[in-house]
Image (cartoon, grey):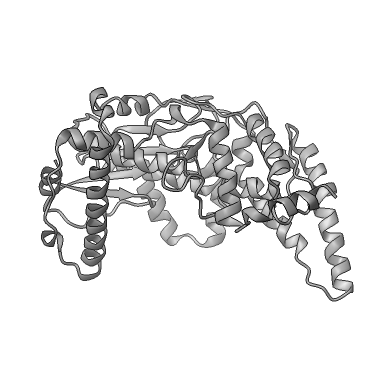
Amino acid sequence: MQLILKQQFSFTFRLLTQIVIERKPKRRLVMRTEILLKNFDEKASTRTVHVYEPPVAPQKLMEAIEWMDDDMITLITPKLLGKRPNTYTLTKALAETLLVEDARQLPVVVIRPSIVGAMWGAPLPGWTDNINGPTGIFAAVGKGVLTNMCGSVVSKADIIPVDIVANMIIVGAAHRATTAYEEIPVMHCASGDLNPLKWEKVVNFLEQFYHKYPMDQCYAVPSTQFHTSRRLFELNYYLKHHIPAATMDMLNGLVGRKKSNVRLYGKVWKMIETLHYFTTHGWTFQSKALPRLWETLHPEDKKGSAIQWYAACKIFRVRLWCCFVTTILAISTNIDLAYFFHPIEIPAAVWNKFLNKVFNFDIRQVDWDSYLFDYVMGIKRFILADKVENIPRARTNLNK
């Protein structure tokens, strides 16, 4: 199987905002990964799986941007956005339109993740390396610097683990390489339709977790309340956070200490605003393609022995490293060095077992209590560098 793929296909996983196809000796599979929540407006509560028509032709917009100055671009931006929350959502939609227009004859597939969260499975459950999206919100709640958010607790959080996204991309690429489609297939990688997680559950879990496993340093008792009213939320935020922070900075300035509280809450506010549009709206993203793609792996092949699975893992790790080195060298030297690495034959049965067990992307298997526990522990471990042995002392400080 790998020999056939090596001889006949090149896989391009494009996670950026443009498609670049540089070499033409082989058929090239382009995997376009979009952010699901960035490709819609708020007209419908249920989002179907197709490419939506943008408000303007991408090519014409790019040509216009070339001669416009910053003031003119700022002036027309609200009209271009329509009901989209920001320019990022617009450019993602434009990128999909370009794919439909210019890459229809190529074996392209679009994967749309929702709100990407920490890792679910092995090797590091709960792993995350940034504070984007819900990670920053969870950390702020644990520190006690965020006690209010604007939104509805009955709305779906639609968090999707990062490894599920990566695994679906890999399996989706393999599936697209061997399956014909009349149009570019679009697949939603989301949890809300198949295994919904409500914000109410998230809020309750965070409050219970942080009382049992508090952060090393807390500014206040961890607690979060959702407000459906924007005005009420802003009033609570300024009374509980912004005004006290400004007061503390003023006092620190008088005694010669560093003023950092307002800057800290400025970062918290940016995180709140990033998710505000999505915590105050509710959608259901049709995710029928995910279970269908999962079922393309034969049921009997899901029952392989641990020895075969382990052997396939070892082979894949070697091959993945070789492919990585080859790609880096090829990019830096503009020379195809793939012939230095001899393809390894893997029996189809072992390969399918490997795909299913190693590339597990079935969101229906995720237990949210277990996942959220690993997620928040991962924030403490990988982001904040909190130590487990400090938890008893942190509990004592929290209860003072």
The image quarter in which residue 57 lies: top left
**In front: 146, or 181?**
146
In the picture, measured across the screen, residue 125 lies left or right of residue 142, that is left
**Residue visible at 43% across and 45% down in the picture:** 92
Is residue 287 shown above or below 241? above
In the picture, measured across the screen, residue 300 lies left or right of residue 196, that is left
Residue 208 screen position, x and y as percent: 70, 37
In the picture, measured across the screen, residue 341 lies left or right of residue 287, that is left
- The quarter of the rendered structure image containing the N terminus is top left
Is residue 131 shown above or below 300? below
Residue 197 screen position, x and y as percent: 56, 29
The image quarter in which residue 175 lies: top left
> Would you say residue 83 is visible in this rendering?
no
Residue 23 screen position, x and y as percent: 17, 56
**Residue visible at 27% across and 43% down in the picture:** 310
**Residue visible at 51% across and 51% down in the picture:** 128
Residue 150 screen position, x and y as percent: 70, 38
> Would you say residue 153 is visible in this rendering?
yes
**In front: 251, or 183?**
251
Number of on-image labels: 0
In the picture, measured across the screen, residue 323 lies left or right of residue 133, that is left
**In front: 160, or 343?**
343
Is residue 196 shown above or below 333? above
